[in-house]
Image (cartoon, helix red, strand yellow):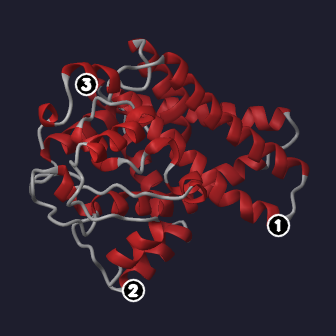
Amino acid sequence: MRVADYLSPEEVAQFTARSDLQAWRLVLGNWLGIVAIFALVGMYPHPLLILLAVPLLAGRQLGLAVLTHEAGHRTLFRTPWLNQVVGQWLCALPVFNDMPSYARGHLRHHRLAGTVEDPDLPNYASYPVSRASFRRKVLRDLSGRTGIKLLASILRGAAGITSDEKRASAAPFVSQLLVQGLLFLLLLACGIGWVYLLWLGTFLTAYMLVIRLRQIAEHAAVPDLYHPDPRQNTRTVDAPWWQRIVLAPNGVNYHLEHHFMASVPCYHLAALRRHLRARHALDDVPACKGYGAVLRHVVA
């Protein structure tokens, strides 16, 4: 699937154009959603409202992770240093991530997708799985076991700072602590410090499940996981708006198009999909309508 077969040089320039305005719209919109959830549960701490806030907050945490991904590709902002600074401090660190480390691993996934050397294969190579197996995965996520294991690995990576190399590896952890502490202090200053527990608890539970569902939707049980064509090894999910709020913010459901041309910002992926459909590039690609269809396909 060659770019030149479906896009002219002018169209490539159009779809790969970055915009600081569009990027700020996504970043600030994501944080406004988080602030609104914090304010609502802070003013009305009813158990049912808190229960509703958890998946919505998990979707906003995924939104930050998606923007980290975009900044790691240097496609979010037109201004290069904004990708580095905003991508790290406003997107990655609030969800216990580190953009430079993430970008290194993720770009390797792009180079090796469709091969047995893809570093992300453990996330989806075993699918389809049985109902019992998938149920165990969901329980691990929602019980916090997956999240605690992740935080423990971050702690292990930061432990024993005795050399320059280890000190450098611990720097992201120190920045993560700084951002998490600042978030707690801001909530405390607003008189709702307890809401930080909702942020952390959501990260350790619902967010882990949301991340798992995103991963399997992108590459699990695709037509041919070891084929170099993204139409074979990657999936786009045509999801309704209410599913995208939690499971596919910021255009992350257009994953086939992202693998077709990773230099396209997330805010142009929907238009790129329409273009590829018009050029008949997706005629033989199985349609996937919603994340329910994905689950029915990947859970045997």
For disc 1, the marked residue is: 47
Lower sequence index among marks 1 and 2: 1
Q: Position of residue 101 (x, y in %)?
A: 32, 34
Q: Position of residue 19 (x, y in %)?
A: 46, 18
For disc 3, the marked residue is: 12
Distance of mark 1 from mark 3, alpha carbons?
49 Å
- Mark 2 is surrounded, within 10 Å at the Cα level, by few (under 14), some (14 to 19) or many (20 or more) other residues, namely few
Residue 273 in the image: above or below residue 170: below
Position of residue 116 in the picture relative to residue 216 (left or right):
left
- For the point 16% across and 62% down, the residue is 225
Distance of mark 1 from mark 2, alpha carbons?
30 Å
- For the point 43% across and 57% down, the residue is 238
Q: Is residue 38 visible?
A: yes
Residue 88 in the image: above or below residue 46: above
Please tell me in which quadrant of the rendered image residue 180 appears.
Answer: top right
Quick one: quadrant of the N terminus?
Answer: top left
**Numbered tag placed on residue 131 in the rendering:** 2
Lower sequence index among marks 1 and 3: 3
Which residue type does callout 3 highlight?
A: Val
Helix, strand or loop under label 2: helix
